[in-house]
Amino acid sequence: MKYGRKIINYIFAKRTKCPAIHYELERKVQADSDRSDIRVFETGIPTQRYGDNRQSTRNAEEAESVRLVQIAKVQGLYIPKSEWNIFGDRRTVPTGESVVFLSNDGTTYTKMKSPFAKSPMKNIFPEDIIYEHLIHNILFPSTKYRFIGISEDVQGIRIVLQQKNISCMFGVPSQKAIDEYMTNVLGLTKENEYFYGNDYFSITDVSNMSDNVLCDSDGRLYFIDPIIKLKKSALEVWEYLYQTKCI
């Protein structure tokens, strides 16, 4: 009877684990898909690009911007500013980082993101900008970005991303719920009043005083556009998250 009970317990344990395993496999497949969307921008680039030359000078930013724009034009991923209106109505939003459009059916935001707008706060270097949204997607898959292409305006290069509109559907969670998600779910340490982090990155701009974090009726949290500060190169952070969150 004891042996039979062990078998039954084993079977039920396996059934309990299956949804979690399936979810992690889905995240891994999605992470691979997101990475493949930008693979053409990695062509011909050495694996080691940082070292002592990892600097965020104006010249380095311009050089990386030119490289990305040239590849985008060759690969059919370049979006002229004259075509921005195809993404819907331009929205007035309190941010200097993105020009935002809402699709005509109200389901999708398109963000023309200026990757260097908050580079000192995010510790973003030229080599990091094409990977930035991938880090968000692994951390916050419920509000993932879809890479659309590259554009430009008078402020320089723009990374064009799309995100599902959920702002009209959900409410604002308590700060306690946000704190618990950051520490218990993401496993981060509260570094000070505004930052949660580990050895690889920190997250801020997740206060319940704004609409940057929403929740549904079941208490699930949705992080719209938090600021992720990198403590290592974006590729190192992505690889770390890929291993810990997707496998």
Image (cartoon, helix red, strand yellow):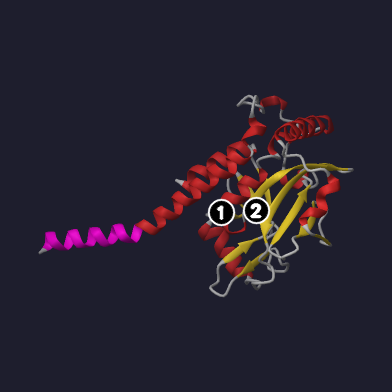
What is the residue that sits farthest to the right in this orientation?
A: 154
Query: Would residue 226 be seen by someone viewing this image from the given angle?
Result: no
Q: Residue at x 63, y 54 (%)?
A: 191
Please report whichever mark, 1 or 2, sits nearer to the chain's N-terminal start.
1
Q: Quadrant of residue 226?
A: bottom right
Q: Quadrant of residue 72?
A: top right
Instruction: Report x, y in % for residue 179.
Output: 59, 64
* Badge 1 vs badge 2, beta-carbon distance below 8 Å: yes
Instruction: Report x, y in % for residue 93.
Output: 81, 61
The residue that label 2 is drawn on is 203
Name the residue nearer the viewer: 193 or 226.
Answer: 226
Instruction: Report x, y in % for residue 29.
Output: 49, 46
Is 130 within the magenta? no
- What's drawn in magenta, residue-wise? 2-17
Left or right of 34 in this view: 132: right
Residue type at mark 1: give it. Leu
- Relative to 114, is 218 above or below? below
Magenta region's main secondary structure?
helix
Q: Residue at x 79, y 42 (%)?
A: 151
Q: Residue at x 36, y 56 (%)?
A: 18
The residue that label 1 is drawn on is 188
